[in-house]
Amino acid sequence: MTKEQSAILKGIAILLMLVYHLKTIPGIEGMDGFVGQTLRQATYPISYFMYVTGYGLYIAHSQNRLTLKYLFKRSLKLYIALWMVLLIFVCGLGSWLYSGKFSLQPGTLIPCLLGWKWDYCVFLWFFLPYVLATFCTKGLYWLLDRLGIPVMLLFTMCMMFACSWLISRYLDSWLIWNTWAYIPVLTLQMLFAITVGASLAHLTLQGRSVTCNWLMGKNVLIILLLLVAVLIRGQITITVAKPFFAITVTWLVLHINFAKPVKQVLMELGHKSMFMWLAQGFIAVEMFSEYFLKLHHPALIWLVWLAITYVVASLLMPVHGWVTRQLRLG
């Protein structure tokens, strides 16, 4: 998987994320029918980000760059992005336009700044488990090199199944109220997708192709296969199916010969996906949902949501880049 393909996959993931979260906009209509439910099942985006992360970190591991210092700098860059988004939407726009909506008391603010709580935006549940999962990669990749891909895929898959079972059984009654237990469960659940990405990198570094020559560039056939996969996924509601469906989509996407304009758009979205991911919940769910509902049609809401989120990310990224350069975070 090249850097271009990684960026394209992240671009696709951010498009899917906004589709997946459409139903969470308070008062939205048109997402309860067959099409809405199918899209909801087939657009879960987290696995794609984890594949790209697992792939990239394994490349760093193969180059002996995956040190604690490297992971700390990488995580600090993520935290700075989170703090920028919270500063603008919680301390800035939130306090100005929605006075009293967001508590700035230390008991709420500090855990949210750390990613320990997600009181300001429920979509931020992903942040701290993701950061912790990246720190787990040092041990994970050490085991991968020694035990091999099949053993580690089986091991992390069993962990994912166990964590998914715990979440399905105890989320509302216990886990959601005990962050000290919920965060580790979410972290361990992510390791399977990271291992999939790392396995892809491992095979690539060995010179072994994970694509099929006969399928490469046959876009019409690939799109038909993707549609079949989406329809099948729409009928399977179990949580553990998410990463396996994402593996199928990722494998098929690697075979697509994208037209140059499409490639450029997806890569641009991929490069800005971090800020788009952090900001999207505040823009249409936590703060401005009443304005989005005036657009009525879910497709139009999605398009405007995408455009605004992209603009916000475009404004924040240069500032983030300047701050991280000043701190010499690379």
Image: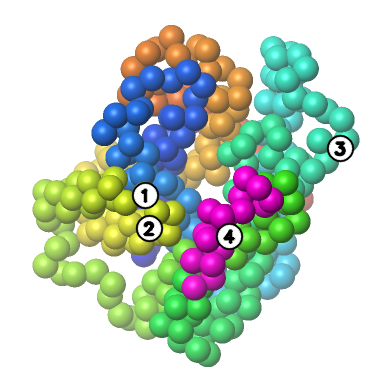
Question: For the residue labelled by badge 3, is the local secondary structure a helix, a strand or a loop?
Answer: helix
Please state if 183 lies on the left or on the right of 42 as rendered: right
Q: Are marks 1 and 4 in contact (CB under 8 Å)?
A: no
Alpha carbon distance from label 1 to label 4: 17 Å
**Magenta stretch: dominant secondary structure:** helix
- The residue tagged 2 is 241
Tell me what residue is drawn at x 24 percent, y 69 percent: 211
Q: Amino acid at mark 3?
A: Gly
Question: Could you tell me if residue 31 is visible in this image?
Answer: yes
Disc number lying in front (3 or 2): 2
Q: Earlier in the sequence, mark 3 or mark 2?
A: 3
Q: Which residues are magenta?
A: 158-175
Q: Which mark is residue 75?
A: none
- The residue tagged 3 is 107
Disc number lying in front (4 or 2): 4
Q: Is residue 161 magenta?
A: yes
Q: Which mark is residue 166?
A: 4
Q: Amino acid at mark 2?
A: Ala
Q: Is residue 307 magenta?
A: no
Q: Position of residue 213 (x, y in %)?
A: 15, 69
Please state if 174 lies on the left or on the right of 50 as rendered: right
Q: Earlier in the sequence, mark 4 or mark 2?
A: 4
Alpha carbon distance from label 2 to label 1: 8 Å
Q: Amino acid at mark 4?
A: Leu
Q: Position of residue 30 (x, y in %)?
A: 34, 22
Q: Are marks 2 and 1 in contact (CB under 8 Å)?
A: yes
Q: Earlier in the sequence, mark 1 or mark 4?
A: 4
Question: For the residue labelled by badge 2, is the local secondary structure a helix, a strand or a loop?
Answer: helix
Alpha carbon distance from label 3 to label 2: 37 Å
Quarter of the image with the C terminus is bottom right
- The residue tagged 1 is 237
